[in-house]
Image (cartoon, rainbow, N blue to C red):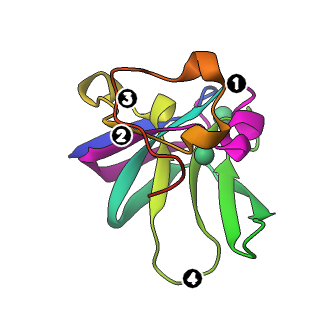
Amino acid sequence: MNVTGKCFCGHISYKAEVDPNIVAVCHCSDCQEHSGTAFGVIAGVIDEEFHLLTGKLKSFIKVAASGNHRELTFCPECGTRIYAKDAGDKPGFIGLRYGTIEQRNELTPNIQVWCKSAQPWAIIESMPKLENQS
Ligand SMILES: [Zn+2]
Ligand SMILES: [Zn+2]
């Protein structure tokens, strides 16, 4: 599914292709802290089809306990999170931040991950749950 998106202030705009079957609520502690809320919602980008149309993203590299480096991108002007992926040039999964997608009304999360670190009140009972990532 082709989507367009933008950050809160409009500095960043993009187009991307996402898989409507890979839309997840993420309860990991990174998502809680980096979003400033209780969980993140991401849509999986297909074949790295993410194209920045305007603006320049800023990145923060998070070193996970596993040693993996994750690149968290955001708008340098307003701080809106745009996507996260494995750092470096090699291909990898891009998790696009749901709230920036203009067609988000057409995308419904179908799984929740990292439930072991979820805030108990934030668990959505009607949605399939995974303890961690997969
Ligand atoms: Zn912005
Ligand atoms: Zn997360």
What residue sits right under mark 4 in the picture?
A: 89
Compared with 79, 114 (above or below) is below
Q: Find residue 59 and report its horizontal and vertical position in percent.
A: 73, 58
Dot 2 or dot 4, earlier in sequence: 2
Which residue is pictured at 75% across the width and 28% down the height?
36
What residue sits right under mark 2 in the picture?
A: 4
Dot 4 or dot 1, earlier in sequence: 1
Q: Find residue 51 and report its horizontal and vertical position in percent.
A: 42, 58
Label 2's element?
Answer: strand
Between tags 2 and 1, which lies in front?
1
Numbered circle sitting on residue 37: 1
Circles 2 and 3: CB atoms closer than 8 Å:
yes
Q: Mark 3 is on which residue type?
A: Glu
Question: How many angstroms separate mark 2 from mark 3 (CA)?
Answer: 6 Å
Q: Find residue 48 and report its horizontal and vertical position in percent.
A: 38, 67
Residue located farthest toward the bottom when viewing the structure as drawn = 90
Chain part drawn in magenta: 10-36
Question: How many angstroms separate mark 4 from mark 3 (CA)?
Answer: 27 Å
Which residue is pictured at 73% across the width and 32% down the height?
78
Q: Mark 1 is on which residue type?
A: Thr
Between tags 2 and 4, which lies in front?
4
Question: How many angstroms separate mark 4 from mark 1 (CA)?
Answer: 30 Å
Label 3's element?
Answer: loop
